[in-house]
Each structure stands twice: as structure tokens, then as C-alpha cells.
Amino acid sequence: MRGVSPIKPLVFAAALGPLLYLALGAWQGSLGANPIETITRSTGIWTLRFLLITLAVTPLRWLTGWNAIMRLRRMLGLFAFAYGSLHLMTYVWLDQFFDWAAIAKDVVKRPFITAGVSAFAVLIPLAATSTAGMIRRLGGRNWRRLHRLAYVAAALGVVHYWWLVKLDTRPPRNYAMLLAGLLAVRLVAFFRGHPSERRGLPVRKS
Amino acid sequence: MLIKPAPGIRSSEITDERLYLRRREFMKAAAVPAVAALAGIVPAPASGQDALPGVRKGVVTLDEALTPWADVTTYNNFYEFGMDKSDPSRNSKAFRAKPWTVKIDGLVNKPGDYLYDDLVAPHALEERVYRLRCVEAWSMVIPWVGFPLRDLLKRVEPRAGATFVEFATLHDPRQMPGQRLDVLDWPYVEGLRLDEAMHPLTILAVGLYGKVLPNQNGAPLRLVVPWKYGFKSIKSIVRIRLTSKQPVSSWQASAPHEYGFYSNVNPDVDHPRWSQARERRIGEFFKRKTLMFNGYADQVAGLYAGMDLKKNY
């Protein structure tokens, strides 16, 4: 079996790339005329990308037979959560500056913000149960059920993106198609009774 | 008693005499932008654009900091050149704003195809500092150069029955790559009521910061209506038509429940998907309150007396 150990730190470093890019840009003042908008967009799109990358891990393993790739899944999922947290923080802090009344109004009144906040809420229990201890406590079966919520989070993320776009819906449409593809692969596997879909315990070692 | 020696002053802390003697120059240099802003004098930016001669300065001034040239010319919504705000400045470099012809037709006594110079030359160019409020809730302060649209309309003599003005942007997908996508029904169309078009604040702009209008800002000729959301201020105009029918703007056609004909800046009427109560002035960290009619209520509120602005958004 090919290992994943040398790859993991590389993936970790690469996953920090978008954040470093933003930090450097903020430091140098090169984030454009509206830096807060740039930060909001970048952290948002990377949240969605990491969600989809995380959801692509299992199908990739089926496709390639490279089982060790599963050991990247938790880290990638946690990066989705980290970028999602930054995205939410950017909105609460930089965009609204802790104007809780305005934020509450936004969450209730603006469907795209409702969808975004819901997506983040869904990610919280997933991040909280990402440790080996929590997997053991929940039991593989329950854990797996709970973590199917990753699809709900990704779907809400796509909807959040779609509803905020002013005119050009092609980018969110592309993400929706990717997500649909990932879901379809899983449905096919489920109905065909793919071995790993039945067995499929979370990989403990990481 | 012990007397401590005075701490030594390192030579690096001693101001060079040449610098010391120039201290007043630094003070002056620092004060220039502040004074200029108050006096309504706009500093010329370093740019590749030619300066416009004979501009009457300070016709309309504003006691608010100008948005830097770099931001005004790189943060643009001009979908003809791409969907991203950085696209227009990158994709419009080869755009040919000359020669340029504007067709003026409809209910006018003097219709015709007007060459740019014939259209603009009879008018004295003025500098006017206006707020620009985008429907996306950001704003700028821009020193435009142009002339009142009313002066042009008077020249072409609107006929009785003309109640609206319809404008169209150039449609040329070879030059405007954004038009190869059907995100909007090209060409871009905008419209004003005739009394809005005749309002003294409404101008046709041919420049900014004293320079020829850059392509990404709508060269060679664009509308500026400072109390309406930015998208009403149509760019690169090739047609002006006077009509008796209310025009349907491109945004209205694209999403009628989100964009109305009037599109006046109004903090009390939200966009269906986001709030319009506040805005981020480019270059500022904290959001500021959006002003009714973008701060021009004293001059323009009368145009809408008795109208339900929630219905006529």
C-alpha cells in the first residue's frame, strides 16, 4: 500500500495557501480597491472548494484504489470548516462590525445569508466529532450517518453562492454540477452495493 | 549628590540641517491635499491618459475625500468587458473610443449621427465632484469632467410629446468580449424621464480627474446621474433617443423584481437580496449610512413628489 505520510504535510501547506495569499495581500495592501470584499469572496469560495474536495476523497479512493488517501479526508474537511469560520468572521467582524441587529436582520431576511449561516451551523457538529475519541464514542455507524451532513452543508453552500450572485450564475452552476456528480457517484455505489460503502468505517488512523 | 549625565544623543537622531531647513516644504506638501479638497481643486493623477484642456474647475464640489484614481479605474462594473471588477481595466486596453458617433433620434427636431467632436465641442467642460453609489452597496467620490445633458438635449430640440430619454451602449463583441456571454440582453440600455435628464445635476461625462475618460470608465462618453444607483449611469453611449414611451432598461429586463426603472438611491428600500441602508465607501473600513437620493435630496426630491418610492424603485 502506498503511504500518504509524506503527502499529508504537503497538502496541509497547500491548503494554507489561500490564507497566506490573503494575509500577504492585506499586509502589502494589494487586495484591490475593496479588500473586505476580496477577503469575503476568497474565504467563501475556498470553503466550498474544500467541502467538495473532501467529498471527492472517497470516490477517488474507489476510482484509484488508493486507500491511504482516506487519511487526508479529515484534514481537508477541517480546512473547509476553518475557511468557513474565517468567512463568517469576515462577515461579522469586517463587514458588519458586530452590528448584531443588522446581522440578525440579514439572517432572517436575506435567503442567501440564511443559507450560508445554515451551512456553517451544519458544519459545526461535523468538526466537533472529527476526533478519534468522538468517532469511538459515536460508533462508526452513527458517525457515518452524522457525517452525511457534509452533503447538506455543501448543497447549502452552493445555494448560498447561487443566491448572492447578481447576474452571472455560471460559477455557482459549475459548483452545483460538481456536487451533483459527487452525489451521483455515491448513489450508484450505494445501489450497486459497493463494498466500501457497506463496510465503510471512518479511517481511524490519521 | 550624584548627578546623572544627560543621555547621549546619537548622531542618527539629529536631523540633517538640509532637511531641517526644508521643514516648511514638508508641512506644505502634507497640507496640499487637505487644502485642495476644501478649495475644490482636484489634484491631477499620474496616468497615461491625456489631460483635458479648458476645464472649468470646481463647478460642483464636495467636502469628502476623493476616491483615488487607481481605485476609480480598476474597480469597475462594466460587464461589456467582463464580469469581474478587475476585468474592465484589463480587457479594455485595445478598445477604440475614437472615432465615435452618437445617433440622436426619436422625438427631436435635429436628429442625426453626431461625431464625437461635433457633439462635445460646443459645450464648456466642467469639473463636478459627485458621489457614486453602486447598487452593490459600495460607493466612491469621483471628480468627473463633462457637461449638463440638458445643454445637449436643448441643442437637438426635443419635440412636444417627448417624455423619456433612452440610451444605448455600443454593441461590438469583437471589442467588448463580455458581450459574447448572454448574461444581459445586449446592447445595454438605460433610460431617464425627460425631467430627470434635464436636471442640472445630470451630466454627460468625458473625463475624470481632469483627464480623458479611461475606456474602463465608459469612454468616450457616459452618463452620470449622481442620485441613482451606478448602473443607471450608462457607459460608452452610441445612441440617445427621445421617446414618449418609458424605456425598459437592461437590468429591468433581466430581473424586474430587483431593478426598477427609477433606481434612485434609497436607504429605506432594500434590494430584495441585500440591504441598502449602509454602504462601504471605497478606502474606508467602517460602513457609512446611505443618504436619501445619495445626498442630493435637496436638489432632486421634488422630481418624485407624491410618488410611492417603494413601488417605483
Image: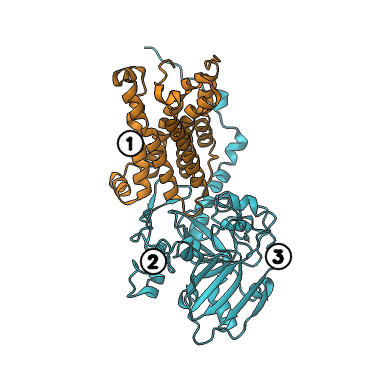
Q: Position of residue A205 (x, y in %)?
A: 43, 15
The one nearer the camera, B261 or B63, is: B261
* Residue B285 visible, this orientation: no
Residues A149 and A51: in front is A149
| Chain letter of disc 2 in the image | B
The percent position of residue A150, horizontal first and vertical second, equals 39, 33
> In the rendered image, which residue does mark 2 sit on?
B313
The answer to whether tags 1 and 2 share a subunit is no
The secondary structure type at the circle numbered 2 is loop
Please say if A76 is above or below B256.
Answer: above
From the image, which quarter does the N terminus of chain B lie in?
top left
Q: Looking at this view, name the residue that lies furthest to the top.
A: B1
Where, by quadrant of the figure, is residue A30 drawn? top right
SS of the residue under disc 3: loop
Estimate the spatial distance between the alpha carbons at disc 1 and disc 3, rounded to whole Å.
Answer: 55 Å
Q: CA distance from mark 1 to mark 2?
A: 35 Å
Identify which residue is drawn at 57% across, 37% down. B20
Disc 3 chain ID: B
Disc 2 crowd rating (10 Å Cα; few below 14, some 14-19, many 20+) is: some
Please tell me whether residue A120 is drawn above or below residue B295 in the rendered image. Answer: above
What is the drawing colour of chain A?
orange
Q: From the image, tell me which residue sits under label 1.
A: A121
Q: Closest to the observer: B117 or A113?
A: A113
Give x and y (percent) for residue A89. Answer: 38, 37
